[in-house]
Image (cartoon, helix red, strand yellow):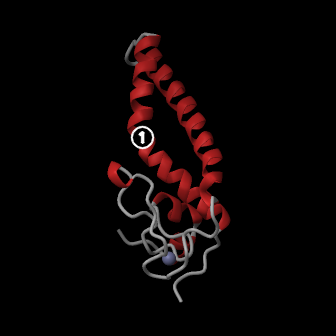
Amino acid sequence: MKFTEAIRRSPIYCILRLKCPHCHTGEFFYKNPYNLKHLGDLHAKCLLCHQSNHPEPGFYQGALYVSYGFGVGLFMGMFLFLNVLSLTIFHMSMEVILIAMIVLMILLSPYTYALSKITWAKMNITFKGLK
Ligand SMILES: [Zn+2]
């Protein structure tokens, strides 16, 4: 899929495509988020722009706050969606809704973990492009 330069420069593109926060081109993570053996592993430096992905020790501790926000937002969004679905199409009990939410949260947790790390990195690292 081809993206215009304006889209490639946006932080949303960097975050959703899990790209390097410096150049928005190189891969940020070592493997895809669902490879549980390498869960959350980053490249030490971007393979294309060679900028460090670890600006300082403990840098990614701030991603915990982002992860909390994503978790609460996702939980509330799923609860609302499943409740509306339950009231309109499928009639589910509250136990079924809660079990469905827990299963979805577990299935989405590797991706939300990766999203929280890249979001924290993007909040603190500015785009410089490839030089
Ligand atoms: Zn890069």
The picture places residue 49, in percent across and down from the top left corner, at 50, 82
Q: Secondary structure at mark 1?
A: helix
The picture places residue 108, in percent across and down from the top left corner, at 42, 40
* Residue 8 shows in this picture: yes
Q: Identify the residue at horizontal 62%, vertical 41% (top origin).
A: 69
Q: Identify the residue at horizontal 57%, vertical 68% (top origin).
A: 54
Which residue is denoted by mark 1 in the rendering? 108
Is ligand 1 less than 8 Å from the beta carbon at label 1? no
Along the viewing direction, whichever of 129 and 57 lies nearer the viewer:
57
Q: Is residue 110 above or below residue 118?
A: above
Q: Is residue 47 left or right of residue 66?
A: left
Instruction: In the displayed orientation, state which residue is furthest to the bottom.
Output: 131
Q: Is residue 35 above or below residue 129?
A: above
> Which quadrant of the rendered structure holds the N terminus?
bottom left
The quarter holding residue 88 reads top left
The picture places residue 111, in percent across and down from the top left corner, at 44, 48
Give the mark count. Answer: 1
Q: Identify the residue at horizontal 48%, vertical 71% (top origin).
A: 44
Instruction: In the displayed orientation, state which residue is furthest to the top.
Output: 93
Badge 1 local density, few (<14 within 10 Å), some, or many (20+)?
some
Q: Is residue 117 left or right of residue 85?
A: right
Q: Amino acid at mark 1?
A: Leu
* Residue 88 shows in this picture: no
Q: Identify the residue at horizontal 55%, vertical 60% (top origin).
A: 12
Along the viewing direction, whichever of 101 and 29 lies nearer the viewer:
29
